């Protein structure tokens, strides 16, 4: 029998959360969570609203540094190195671990400037290289054909789904090793959603993806591994197939069968 | 409109003690809408409401009337230079021959003075004020910002005579000993005093402009691996541009209308400044100095009115600019 208890699945991990606790003031939102996230695969985080999925995700690239009152304990390693080590630079970490947010957050700039922003801040000055990066990223995000004639228009004029794909392109442009996605399709229609799912399927060939989703079907379609969160704890972790067909925990089963409550 | 009726109900039940609340809620809803909502209520409150509405309408009409009278009066008196005295407008604007005793009303020196001191103030005080605004919003620890922000807003209330007095006792002697300026009075002294005077306005408004930017913009930038500095210059500054424009324009408005503090340190010499430390005069300072001695109905009085009218027109143009800048933001 395979052991699928949290943290003990045998995978070559890219990111590894070890005994992670996250506090907002005195409220503990994540309780002793350990999770290995494999290289070049998709790991889905599922669980009821408010269980701490976003909180966990944001701990993986030190986004909590920006939230007043938030505090993280424990370790998160990227290729074996602790990103919370005193000498770890959050700027470098976030360059290597990109993030796509639940709501699209385009900068009030042109589409081109949005996508070129990342490469520029990382020192790319050459116009031809930037052009190429912008095109490659937009193609990867399945947006190029829709926007290639209006790269110099404001990104705010795009539709919600287009904005979200542009935000994904913006992250791809800095070529991170890991991409964290917090319900990237929650505000999108089925067509845009399936485009993004296709995109994630492409992305895992090069990147490691950790994705929060509320949709069981989506988790089942796109992920190799799934972690089930409940009240700040990781209740169960395993291959997506196992989680959805042979859950070990009663809570997991209740949740995926929709009998939760 | 949604919460107005609620407020009204409560106010009626609690009586006159809550009168301020009635006033506040009515202030935003003078007009038919309020009346139609109120008409569903008891007759007594209906009557009270009507009276209150009419009192407020009266106050509004009075204020609008007063402002209109002021503008018409200024426009009437301010154009006499050109209509009664037949002094050409272009000479008023572009000639520097100013000798009202001999029917010469060329005000170019004062106009230039106003533009120069205001320009000085905004070029020095503007970037500095925006920088402090960025600091308070993005860099300073929350506690520090909480203390500093109200402190800076208090500075807006310092009377201009105090700024002028400090300029006179500290700045002018400093410039006298450390620069080529023989007296210390002049353009630079006025410009520096004004730079400091506009700082609270610019700081406070630019801080607001930054604070009103959504967290998602900051997170979006940081999640791409930007430094805080890159986030500020690359994302926040351009995103806040309309708010910052407003901060600068209102700074300019404050600088352009300031008379007393400028008059105390500018040197008040009716000539173009021969350098940044040389004395000159501005529209406001010239009005302050000459208005007492100008005989009623004289050419000199007319010219001073024309200067005042010009200031009014500039102020109105600035307000329009603010509206225009604000329209750009969502
Ligand atoms: N900035 C914050 N300050 C205080 N408490 C917070 C903060 N953000 C989240 N929380 C709390 O932490 C808990 C976990 O929130 P989190 O956003 O991680 O949940 P989630 O699983 O992502 O939920 P959802 O599916 O609705 O997005 C919740 O109880 C929430 O109220
Ligand atoms: Mg969430």
Image: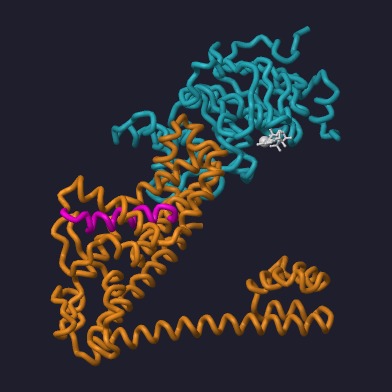
Chain colours: A cyan, B orange
Above or below for A6 versus A223: above
Position of residue B129 measured from the top left corner of the image (x, y, whole percent) = 39, 49
Q: Nearer the viewer, residue B317 or A10?
A: B317
Front in this rendered view, residue A134 or B167: B167
Q: Residue furthest bottom?
A: B84
Look at the image and tell me whether residue B229 can be seen: yes
Instruction: Name the main secondary structure of what is drawn in magenta.
Output: helix
**What residue is shown at x 38% (from left), y 64% (from top)?**
B253
Which quadrant of the rendered structure holds the N terminus of chain A?
top right
Look at the image and give the residue range highlighted in magenta. Answer: B182-201
> Is residue A149 shown to the viewer in this render?
no
| Nearer the observer, A230 or B173 | B173
Residue A105 or A132: which is nearer the viewer?
Answer: A105
> Residue at the spot x=70%, y=70% of the render?
B20
Left or right? Give the position of B96 relative to A151: left
Residue at the (28%, 90%) spot, across then down: B297
Q: Is residue A248 magenta?
A: no
Q: Quadrant of the C terminus of chain A?
A: top right
Instruction: Say which residue appears at 53% left-offset and 42% top-offset.
Output: B145
């Amino acid at each position: 029998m395979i052991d699928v208890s949290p943290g003990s699945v045998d995978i070559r991990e890219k990111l590894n959360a070890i005994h992670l606790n996250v506090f907002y003031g005195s409220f503990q939102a994540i309780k002793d969570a350990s999770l290995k996230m494999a290289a070049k695969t998709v790991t889905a985080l599922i669980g009821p609203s408010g269980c701490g999925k976003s909180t966990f995700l944001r701990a993986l690239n030190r986004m909590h540094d920006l939230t007043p009152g938030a505090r993280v304990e424990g370790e998160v390693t990227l290729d074996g190195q602790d990103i919370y080590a005193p000498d770890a630079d959050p700027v470098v970490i976030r360059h290597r671990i990109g993030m796509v947010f639940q709501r699209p957050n385009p900068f009030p700039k042109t589409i081109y400037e949005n996508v070129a922003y990342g490469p520029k801040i990382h020192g790319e000055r050459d116009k031809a290289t930037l052009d190429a990066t912008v095109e490659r990223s937009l193609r990867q995000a399945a947006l190029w054909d829709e926007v290639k004639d209006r790269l110099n228009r404001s990104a705010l004029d795009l539709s919600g789904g287009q904005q979200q794909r542009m935000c994904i392109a913006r992250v791809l442009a800095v070529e991170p090793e890991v991409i964290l996605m917090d319900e990237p399709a929650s505000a999108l229609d089925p067509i845009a959603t399936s485009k993004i799912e296709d995109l994630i399927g492409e992305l895992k060939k090069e990147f490691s993806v950790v994705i929060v989703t509320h949709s069981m079907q989506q988790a089942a379609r796109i992920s190799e591994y799934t972690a089930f969160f409940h009240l700040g704890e990781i209740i169960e972790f395993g291959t997506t197939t196992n989680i959805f067909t042979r859950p070990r925990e009663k809570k997991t089963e209740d949740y995926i069968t929709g009998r939760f409550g | 409109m949604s919460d107005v009726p609620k407020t009204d109900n409560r106010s009626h039940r609690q009586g006159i003690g809550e009168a301020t609340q009635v006033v506040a809620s009515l202030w935003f809803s003078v007009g038919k809408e309020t009346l139609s909502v109120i008409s569903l209520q008891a007759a007594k409150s209906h009557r009270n409401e009507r009276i209150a509405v009419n009192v407020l309408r009266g106050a509004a009409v009075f204020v609008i009337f007063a402002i209109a009278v002021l503008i018409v009066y200024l426009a009437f008196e301010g154009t006499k230079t050109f209509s009664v005295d037949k002094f050409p407008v272009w000479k008023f604007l572009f000639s520097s021959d100013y000798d009202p005793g001999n029917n010469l009303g060329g005000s170019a020196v004062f106009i230039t003075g106003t533009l120069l001191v205001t320009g000085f103030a905004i070029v020095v005080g503007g970037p500095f004020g925006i920088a402090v605004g960025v600091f308070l919003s993005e860099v300073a620890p929350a506690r520090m910002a909480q203390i500093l922000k109200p402190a800076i807003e208090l500075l807006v209330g310092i009377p201009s005579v105090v700024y002028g007095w400090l300029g006179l006792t500290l700045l002018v002697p400093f410039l006298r000993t450390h620069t080529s300026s023989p007296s210390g009075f002049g353009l630079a002294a006025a410009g520096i005093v004004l730079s400091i005077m506009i700082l609270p306005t610019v700081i406070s408004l630019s801080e607001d402009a930054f604070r009103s930017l959504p967290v998602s913009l900051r997170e979006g930038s940081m999640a791409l691996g930007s430094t805080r500095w890159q986030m500020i210059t690359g994302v926040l500054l351009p995103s806040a541009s309309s708010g910052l424009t407003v901060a600068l324009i209102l700074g300019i408005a404050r600088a352009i209308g300031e008379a007393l503090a400028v008059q105390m340190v500018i040197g008040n010499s009716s000539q173009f400044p021969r350098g940044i430390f040389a004395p000159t005069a501005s529209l406001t300072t010239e009005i302050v100095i000459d208005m007492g001695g100008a005989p009623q109905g004289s050419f000199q009085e007319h010219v001073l009115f024309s200067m005042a009218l010009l200031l009014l027109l500039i102020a109105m143009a600035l307000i329009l600019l603010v509206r225009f800048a604000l329209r750009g933001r969502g």
